[in-house]
């Protein structure tokens, strides 16, 4: 088994090596064109990603994956930064081998890190020619600052990012731990972004990808899936909710299997990425199906010391 790095802006992780359809060609190429892939699908085609269990999750540019096996141009991988009860090492699935690259000298460990804090950022060559559009929360090793650009390492060499689109931290461990309001604020900027099953980027989030990513933006790595998120963190009484707490919803009016997660917004409202055909929104919980299905809350954020 070896480590490889994601070498496209967003790599979709498929359930099987043959899960991708003909219409998914733009998502499995290198370079991948995620925007065109999504824009050219009908509601029914997007819904099939979920209902036919085609997609598991996604990985961002520069994310580390462990290779388990190769088959017909595909790599069976574990996404090491996405905790899951399915495998103690991370999240399982298949990525086109051409979207991954081996680079033993590339690493995020023990280095200053440039984190994309704009919704999307343009990666430029050292000659300032646009190369890729990369997602919110993409993380790359920081090298230096020059002429309004930040030089970063990528899996294929050095490149540039605009200074205003990223924030630099001294290490991954130095990313500050935000509070609940910070988690809410991170999520608010994506209001109106269409839902995407398996989505883990600013091209589209699913419900648990949204909560995972907004927690990640504030220094917390939490489980990838809603049912796993509901089993970790600090249990919160449903009468003691605070902004930034994660809310969980189950079938059979809260007694069945967990199927959804949202972020408590405050004042009886929820911020969430609902389902295929809808977009990130803030809703009142009262008198909705969500009010009936609410079954648990968890807190992953730390209270700011006075």
Image (spheres, rainbow, N blue to C red):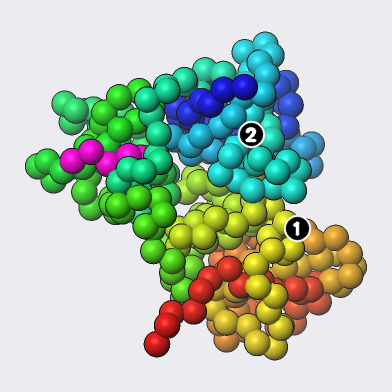
Tell me which residue sits at (72%, 21%) in the image.
18
Q: Which residues are magenta?
A: 140-144
Quadrant assignment, res 128:
top left
Query: Could you classify mark 1 by the number of other residues whose Cα lies within 10 Å: few (under 14), some (14-19), or many (20 or more)?
Result: many
Tell me which residue sits at (66%, 40%) in the image.
89
Tell me which residue sits at (70%, 75%) in the image.
235
Residue 261 vs residue 50, the one in the foreground: 261
Q: CA distance from mark 1 to mark 2?
A: 19 Å
Q: Would residue 18 be counted in the magenta stretch?
A: no
In the rendering, at what x and y percent does residue 272 appear? 60, 64
Relative to 269, say whether 218 is above or below. Answer: above
- Give the quarter of the figure containing the N terminus: top right
Tell me which residue sits at (51%, 60%) in the image.
220
Q: Which residue is mark 1?
A: 227
In the rendering, at what x and y percent does residue 114 appear? 31, 46
1 or 2: tag closer to the N-terminus: 2
In the rendering, at what x and y percent does residue 109 appear? 40, 41
Query: Could you classify mark 2 by the number of other residues whose Cα lies within 10 Å: few (under 14), some (14-19), or many (20 or more)?
Result: many
- Answer yes or no: do the residues labelled 1 and 2 have beta carbons within 8 Å? no
Q: Which residue is mark 2?
A: 78
Quadrant assignment, res 51:
top right
Secondary structure mostly seen in magenta is strand
- Give the quarter of the figure containing the C terminus: bottom left
Relative to 213, say whether 284 is above or below. Answer: below
In the rendering, at what x and y percent does residue 217 appear? 45, 58
Residue 214 vs residue 5, the one in the foreground: 5
Residue 4 vs residue 42, the one in the foreground: 4
Horizontal relation, residue 106 to residue 262: left or right? left
Total numbered labels placed on residues in the image: 2
Which of the two marks, 1 or 2, is nearer to us in this view?
Answer: 2
């Amino acid at each position: 088994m070896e480590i490889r790095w994601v070498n496209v802006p967003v790599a979709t992780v498929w359930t099987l090596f043959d899960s991708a359809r003909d219409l998914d060609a733009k998502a499995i190429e290198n370079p991948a064109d995620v925007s065109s892939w999504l824009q050219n699908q009908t509601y029914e085609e997007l819904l099939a990603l979920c209902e036919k269990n085609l997609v598991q999750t996604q990985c961002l540019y520069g994310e580390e994956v462990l290779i388990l096996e190769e088959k017909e141009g595909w790599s069976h991988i574990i996404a090491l930064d996405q905790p899951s009860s399915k495998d103690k090492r991370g999240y399982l699935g298949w990525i086109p081998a051409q979207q991954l690259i081996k680079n033993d000298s590339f690493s995020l460990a023990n280095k200053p890190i440039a984190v994309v804090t704009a919704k999307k950022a343009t990666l430029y060559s050292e000659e300032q020619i646009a190369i890729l559009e990369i997602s919110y929360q993409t993380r790359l090793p920081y090298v230096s600052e020059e002429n309004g650009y930040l030089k970063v390492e990528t899996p294929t060499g050095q490149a540039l990012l605009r200074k205003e689109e990223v924030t630099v931290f001294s290490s991954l461990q130095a990313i500050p731990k935000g509070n609940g309001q910070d988690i809410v604020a991170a999520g608010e900027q994506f209001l109106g972004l269409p839902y995407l099953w398996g989505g883990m980027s600013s091209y589209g989030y699913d419900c648990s990808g949204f909560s995972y990513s907004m927690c990640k933006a504030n220094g917390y790595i939490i489980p990838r899936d809603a049912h796993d998120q509901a089993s970790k963190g600090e249990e919160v009484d449903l009468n003691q909710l605070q902004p930034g707490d994660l809310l969980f919803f189950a079938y059979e009016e809260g007694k069945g299997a967990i199927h959804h997660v949202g972020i408590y917004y405050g004042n009886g409202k929820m911020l969430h990425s609902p389902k295929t055909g809808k977009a990130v929104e803030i809703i009142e919980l009262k008198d909705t199906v969500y009010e009936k299905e609410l079954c648990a809350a968890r807190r992953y954020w730390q209270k700011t010391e006075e």
